[in-house]
């Protein structure tokens, strides 16, 4: 019996983009056109302050106004990226907890829904930060480490996504995903939508989105949906101990197991 994703799909696909910038507007429109789901990691306080910075190529990068952001991400996941995007290495623990907790609260208030994902700002991550993410009540914490693998990460507080969209491996990694036969294969792309302008990546991302939407075996999901489903599969021991339907394939037939049901 082979484990599958919802709908009997054999693969999962997610794009997770950080910082909540203006280019998220056309990017979300593109995801919507192809029926895909993104995860958007936002800094509540920086959104309030209309923070602008300059990309190394000279392009100004602007954060989204909360009023625009409020309805933009409907159907997608809003996750925390800390309150002000600090480098967390030398912060006292109580400040890390505040950066996580206050951002979660502000985003929940702005969007009127639960915020249960966390993406670490910059590239520093350690056990102490992981403990803070657990303490605040996040369901997962995504680090900047990348796996270049199709196996889903099972360390939810040391989450490694698959590929960063500026890596030269991007096309080859995505190509391999379409061919992959691994159980519960996942392709997760990390980045920032401003790179699509700055690095002329719109066509590349659009062609990936189009191919994912045309594939019959891929489940487009948010990062949180992926984590929740993997946790439900983790707890499976012949009995579905979760609150969601589990999907399997057996001798070419799709079968489902409802909560409480056993094989
Ligand atoms: Zn960031």
Image (spheres, rainbow, N blue to C red):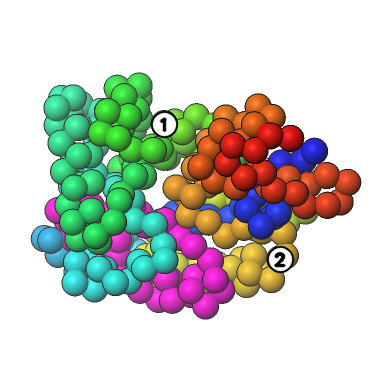
Which residue is at the far right?
Answer: 251
Taking the image as shown, residue 69 lies to the left or right of residue 202, namely left
Q: Quadrant of residue 46?
A: bottom left
Q: 27 above or below 163?
A: below
| Image coords of residue 240 (percent x, y) | 61, 36
Q: Quadrant of residue 110?
A: bottom left
Determine the secondary structure under disc 1. Answer: loop
Of the residues under marks 1 and 2, which one precedes in the sequence?
Answer: 1
Q: Residue at x 86, y 51 (%)?
A: 252
Q: Can residue 169 be seen at all in this image of the molecule?
A: no
Which of 193 and 237 lies nearest the eye of the viewer? 237
Residue linked to disc 2: 215
Q: Residue at x 74, y 35 (%)?
A: 263
Q: How many marks?
A: 2
- 19 within the magenta span: yes
Answer few, some or many: residues within 10 Å of disc 2's Cα (few below 14, many 20 plus, some between 14 and 19): few
Q: Residue at x 35, y 21 (%)?
A: 127
Which residue is at the far top?
Answer: 127
- 233 within the magenta span: no
Q: 167 above or below 1?
A: below
Taking the image as shown, residue 79 lies to the left or right of residue 183, namely left
Which of 258 and 22 lies nearest the eye of the viewer? 258
Q: 36 above or below 131?
A: below
Q: Which residues are magenta?
A: 18-47
Taking the image as shown, residue 55 lies to the left or right of residue 151, namely left
| Image coords of residue 21 (percent x, y) | 29, 65
Q: Residue at x 11, y 60 (%)?
A: 49
| Image coords of residue 203 (percent x, y) | 56, 73
Determine the secondary structure under disc 2. Answer: loop
Residue linked to disc 1: 157
Which quarter of the image is occupied by the N terminus? top right
Report the disc number at residue 116.
none
């Amino acid at each position: 019996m082979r484990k599958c994703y919802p709908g009997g799909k054999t693969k999962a696909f997610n794009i997770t983009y950080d910082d909540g910038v203006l280019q998220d507007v056309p990017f979300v429109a593109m995801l919507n056109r192809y029926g895909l789901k993104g995860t958007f990691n936002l800094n509540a306080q920086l959104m309030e302050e209309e923070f602008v910075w300059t990309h190394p190529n000279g392009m100004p990068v602007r954060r989204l106004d909360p009023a625009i952001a409020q309805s933009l991400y409907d159907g997608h996941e809003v996750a925390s990226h800390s309150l002000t995007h600090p480098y967390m290495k030398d912060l006292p623990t109580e400040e890390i907890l505040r950066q996580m907790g206050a951002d979660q609260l502000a985003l929940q208030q702005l969007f009127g829904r639960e915020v249960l994902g966390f993406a670490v700002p910059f590239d520093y991550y350690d056990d102490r930060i992981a403990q803070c993410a657990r303490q605040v009540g996040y369901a997962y914490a995504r680090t900047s480490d990348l796996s270049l693998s199709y196996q889903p990460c099972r360390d939810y507080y040391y989450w490694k996504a698959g590929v960063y969209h500026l890596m030269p491996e991007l096309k080859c990694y995505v190509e391999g995903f379409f061919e992959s036969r691994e159980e519960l294969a996942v392709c997760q792309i990390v980045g920032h939508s401003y790179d699509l302008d700055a690095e002329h990546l719109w066509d590349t991302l659009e062609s990936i989105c189009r191919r994912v939407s045309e594939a019959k075996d891929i489940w487009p999901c948010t990062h949180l949906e992926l984590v929740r489903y993997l946790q439900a599969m983790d707890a499976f021991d012949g009995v579905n101990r979760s609150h969601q339907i589990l999907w399997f394939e057996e001798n070419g037939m799709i079968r489902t197991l409802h909560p409480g049901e056993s094989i």
